[in-house]
Amino acid sequence: MGRDAVCAPENQASAQPATAHTEASRPDVEVLLQGPAPLIRIIVPLEYIDRAGETVAGRLIAIRPLVNAQLVNAGQYTHPATDPENGATDLWLYTGETAPVALTANRKIPNPWSDEVLAKLKNDAAADLQTDHFEVDGVYYTMAPGYGPARIVAVSTRSVAETRALQLFLARVMLIVLILVVELLLVALAAQRYLVEPLEKLAFSVADWRRHGTFQPDLPRALPLEIRQMERAFSRATKRLDRHEARLTRATKQQDLLIKEIHHRVKNNLQIVASLLNLQANRIKLPEAREEFHLVRDRVRSLATLHRHLYPEGGLSALDIRAFLEELASQIFTANNRCNKGSVSLSLDIEGVPITPDQAVPLSLIVTEVVTNALRYAFPNERCGSVQIRLARNEDGAVLTIQDDGIGLDATAQSDAEKREGIGLQLVRGFARQLGGTLEINSAVGTVYTLAFPIQPVRRTIL
């Protein structure tokens, strides 16, 4: 197709060329996309005078390529950069239906139209986007509005100066990152050397001081002032604590000795009182009065035995109830002349129940009263039998059971009513209330005393 084409007027019968010029309307410009290259068609409405001298309306139609090859070769579309190190930039015309047309003669970027780029531009044309910019494989694409459906696409690459600047920027960033990493490593090493390790050594020295009583931290000389001050503060504190602990140890030992001495003196005084009661009872002629003195003697002896078992522990720990009850029962049997005769046997089943000293006193008196009454009244006329003492734990506390297979409480009460209703049974009930327990007496077969009482928390001796 030629460069320009002019169409005939609408009145084809006219033979005369147009000679008169009339006012023209606004031209109509259209881009034609048929063929390998886009064309532009310009239609200009006009009026002219035909051969008959009449004014006739017509149109002037001009069709030409949208991109002029001569202008492209002459470099009319672009202005070359004066800096040879500038990046290469090519201009292209893209319509969306034909292949891109170059607007620059010397294309510096060979084959910039990959499938990915064309798909991107096609999507922009379908979305009716006039402007866009993106990067594919190091090539930058910038789309700007052209004429009609055509778009102008600038294709460029990074220049040597830009590449050098980018490399310099990345090198500086990497250098900054490297410097930061080195600084962090140095800070971590310094913190480990001058902060963490000294604190760990201080902590180890404190633990070693608690085990062996010596505080000797092996710290390096080059330390921050705060760590040195902390070390001196720890040293002063440990020395003060050592002195205070030594004073407490001496006071504890002295207190323990005093408590032991008190219990020892109480035990001796009770034994003296028991001996005096025994001497006084031997001088009494009346049997009933002599038996009352013997009962009081046995009670005092049980308390003396209790204090002998208490004072080795300082009076603050749990009583060894098994050893105590064994000795107390043997002592009661000896006082009532039952050890060598063998007519009444003793059976003990004692569990390791923790008993406090406050509970031990009423418990020992209860055992003394019940076992003494069983030996004196449950086996008359040298009758054979047995006495059983059991102490066991249950869910809420402990249970003390004293049982004999004698004649029973009812039969004893009929023969010795005055003796059985005396102070002994009243003391047993009173001591049971003092323990906070419940007492049950069953005389169906022999006599069974069952005492259930709570277990109190045991205070430990401070050493």
Image (cartoon, rainbow, N blue to C red):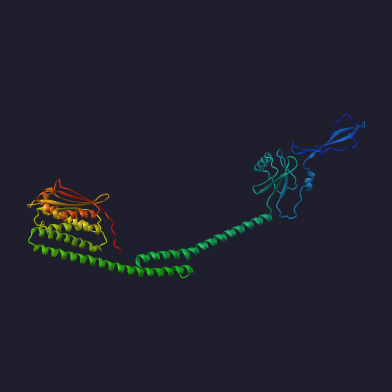
Q: Which of 183 and 347 is in front in this view?
A: 347
Res 16 → quadrant: top right
The correct choice, above or below, for 306 with respect to 228 in the image is above
Residue at horizontal 67%, vertical 55%? 162
Compared to residue 325, the image places residue 50 above or below, namely above
Q: Is residue 53 above or below residue 197?
A: above
Q: Looking at the picture, how far across and down is residue 226, in whole percent?
A: 48, 68
* Quarter containing the C terminus: bottom left
Residue extending farthest to the front is 418
User: Residue 399, image x and y in percent?
Assistant: 22, 51
- Residue 439: where, in percent of width, then height? 21, 50
Closest to the observer, 74 or 213: 213
Residue furthest top as drawn: 13
Q: Where is residue 39 in the image (x, y as percent from the top left)?
A: 77, 38
- Name the residue: 28% across, 58% down: 458
Q: Which of 410 and 349 is in front in this view?
A: 410
Instruction: Answer with left or right where residue 343 lies relative to residue 453.
Output: left
Residue 269 located left or right of residue 209 = left
Q: Quadrant of the N terminus?
A: top right
In this image, 77 relative to 359: left or right?
right
Q: Is residue 345 visible in this depiction of the protein?
A: no
Q: Is residue 69 left or right of residue 210?
A: right
When asked about the image quadrant of residue 339, the answer is: bottom left
